[in-house]
Image (spheres, rainbow, N blue to C red):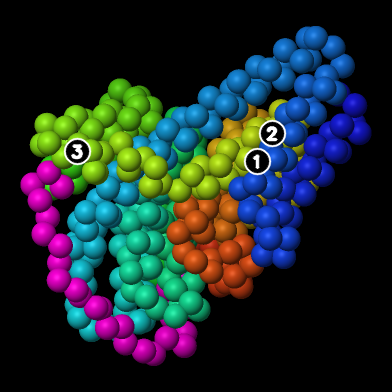
Amino acid sequence: MHSGVQVLLILMAIAAFLGVVFEEVIHVNKAKVVLFFGALAWMVLFIAAPDLAFREQVQAALSHNITDIASLWLFLLATMTFVAYLNKKGLIENIIYSILPAHITERKLLFLTGLFCFVFSSIADNITATLVSIALVVSLNLELRKTLRFATLVIFAVNSGGVAMITGDVTTLMIFLANKVEITNLLLLAFPALLAVLLLAGLLSVGLSGEVMIQKSELKPIRGVDKVIAGIFLLTIFGTILGSLLFAIPPVLSFLTGLAVMFLVARFFNEDIENDPILEYIRAIEFETLLFFLGVLLLVGMLQFIGVLQGLTALYDVMPTLGANFLMGLLSALIDNVPLTAALLKSDLEMTTAEWMGLTYAVGVGGSLLIIGSAAGIVAMSKVPGLTFMTYLRSFGLLLMAFAFGFLAVYGVGLLVG
């Protein structure tokens, strides 16, 4: 491929990124911008193909990219439909309000939120944990600057919670399956990762001195069918974990099965009625989020095809491994961590256990540094009014401090293990 075409494609990816950053300035929805450039980039690849053989390579790469996107879309659709139903029926609100006290200090609530997100994302997927946690934050009706602090902690804590579990983060699973770390090494990541979350909570709590009055309105009555569907949701989460561990069943398949069971159970309980059909809850999910994911992953797939991501492994030849791993964490805030990790694994890098543990943490949590760097950030941005790329960027310094602490702490634990 001509170098000029590669430069054009990279510029298009940069333009899409700038469109997200300056969304409030240009007044064009970020999903529309990235979808436009993502689709156009692949059009350029087809048009600029020098011959039929290269065009077939582009077709194969696009088909693989679309398959990955479809899996994510369907997984998100199933997860968000569950959450939309349970939220509409008041079950999530009832659980949250039954746990929280009527009076609690903002600082204590911030720490409890971070701990809840960390633990919940360790047993559930990041997106589900984010949706539930953000619903809690929004329901508090805090002033905007405080809501943004809570949302920032949610994103960082959710990404940190899944990094020590092979079912909690895809990149952790990839590194484990490549035999770079043992399962016991990964479990040891949990302690320093949690300390980093608590450090960020402490930093964000500076200036919070008020008390939150939890307005507990009369709890909605929870019907039998709602309890059953909530049980199906929990069983789907645990079934996804066990199915992935024991039989390598793709998570999307497990969640689609759970969603189908939810539809059938609703019909059995005569819940699927004309004025409230169960399938209508699919329309309640955030399709803007799905379109944003589509555009981002099209751009990332294009960058992987033209070799930009593979070129990143050259950093290990010019700088110390520890520094390169840390830089990979920073880059994962801009580049999807799955293809980034895949490129690093394919390059057959020679690293110690401590360095592989550090890389696992870096690519799993580094996406928290920017709002667009992780699924949790993108979901939160679509749910919290006022949470944009620029408002989230105000906390970059605090996020970087917590991330650096967690990275070094994980590396230190790795040295002890080694």
Q: Of 195 and 232, which appears nearest the observer?
A: 232
Tag 3 residue: 273
| Residue 44 lies in quadrant | top right
User: What residue sits right under mark 1 in the picture?
Assistant: 35
Callout 2 crowding tier (Cα within 10 Å): few <14, some 14–19, many ≥20: some
In the image: residue 343, left or right of residue 258: right
CA gap, disc 3 and disc 1: 36 Å
Location of residue 187 in the rendering, given as x and y in whole percent from the top left corner: 35, 48
Residue farthest top in this picture: 52
Residue 223 falls within the magenta-colored stretch: yes
- Give the residue type that dot 3 points to: Ile
Frontmost of labels 3 and 2 is 3
Q: Which amino acid does label 1 sit on?
A: Leu
Does residue 332 appear left or right of residue 162 in this picture?
right
Q: Is residue 117 magenta?
A: no
- The residue identified by callout 2 is 39
Q: What amino acid type should be assigned to the residue bearing mark 2?
A: Ala
**Secondary element at tag 2:** helix
The mark that comes first in sequence, 3 or 1, is 1
Q: Count all numbered tags in the image, as a single digit.
A: 3
Span of residues in magenta: 199-226
- Labelled pair 1, 2 in contact (Cβ < 8 Å): yes
Q: Residue placed farthest to the front in the image?
A: 275
